[in-house]
């Protein structure tokens, strides 16, 4: 059965999409074509809305993964759900971790925003749609930096 799941093209499409943007299951289920914006510089941002359709976050799509996101919305109506039927057994957390680590390393490497390490962790925190109180979770669990890499006085 596990081999069949891995060959499911829709599941693979969802996996690639989440690797590109790190969305949670609930946000993914509510995501509409119109929530995705491509800017003149080629960057793609996704508006994440709460269950009442109020925008609460804008998150970046990883550089180099724009095609994955654009192919998911090509030729579709703006109000259409991108993933109307998510499989029940879909595990997204490992994909969110991959996204967080890739985003962290990209921002640090290119330093387009002039951020220090702590600011990059905060940037990833917001991209994961998490609150400030989850900084340690992002640092330790999502990014694997651990408490030994960052002293408390730098927080």
Image: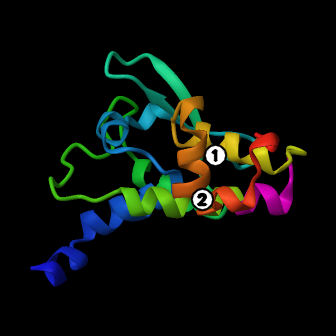
Magenta: main secondary structure equals: helix
> Residue 52 is drawn in which quadrant?
top left
- Tell me if mark 2 has few (under 14), some (14-19) or many (20+) residues whose alpha carbon lies within 10 angstroms of its own: many
Q: CA distance from mark 1 to mark 2?
A: 9 Å
Between discs 1 and 2, the one toward the N terminus: 1
Q: Is residue 141 above or below residue 152?
A: below
Residue with the most extreme bottom position: 3
Q: Are marks 1 and 2 in contact (CB under 8 Å)?
A: yes
Q: Is residue 90 left or right of residue 54?
A: left
Q: Is residue 68 visible?
A: no
Judge depth for marks 1 and 2 and give the one in front: 2
Quadrant for the N terminus in the image? bottom left
Q: Residue at x 63, y 46 (%)?
A: 124
The mark total stands at 2
Q: Position of residue 3 (x, y in %)?
A: 17, 84
Residue 111 lies in magenta, yes or no?
yes
Q: Is residue 49 left or right of residue 62?
A: left
Q: Residue at x 51, y 56 (%)?
A: 141
Q: Position of residue 25 (x, y in %)?
A: 31, 44
User: Where residue 124 is drawn, which disc sits there?
Assistant: 1
- Tell me if mark 1 has few (under 14), some (14-19) or many (20+) residues whose alpha carbon lies within 10 angstroms of its own: many
Q: Is residue 148 above or below residue 42?
A: below
> Residue 38 is drawn in which quadrant?
top right
Q: Is residue 51 visible?
A: yes
Segment tinted magenta in the rendering: 105-112
User: Where residue 143 is drawn, which disc sits there?
Assistant: 2
Which is nearer the eye, 12 or 118?
Answer: 118
């Amino acid at each position: 059965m596990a081999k069949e799941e891995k060959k499911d093209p829709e599941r693979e499409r969802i996996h690639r999409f989440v690797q590109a943007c790190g969305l949670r299951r609930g946000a993914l289920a509510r995501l509409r074509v119109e929530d995705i914006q491509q800017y003149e510089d080629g960057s793609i941002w996704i508006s994440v809305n709460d269950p009442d359709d109020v925008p609460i976050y804008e998150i970046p799509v990883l550089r180099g993964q724009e095609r994955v996101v654009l192919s998911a919305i090509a030729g579709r109506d703006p109000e259409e759900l991108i993933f109307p039927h998510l499989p029940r057994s879909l595990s997204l957390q490992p994909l969110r971790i991959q996204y967080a680590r890739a985003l962290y390393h990209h921002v640090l490497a290119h330093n387009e925003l002039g951020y220090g390490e702590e600011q990059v962790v905060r940037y990833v925190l917001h991209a994961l749609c998490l609150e400030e109180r989850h900084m340690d979770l992002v640092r330790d669990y999502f990014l694997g930096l651990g408490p030994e890499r960052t002293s408390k006085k730098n927080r």
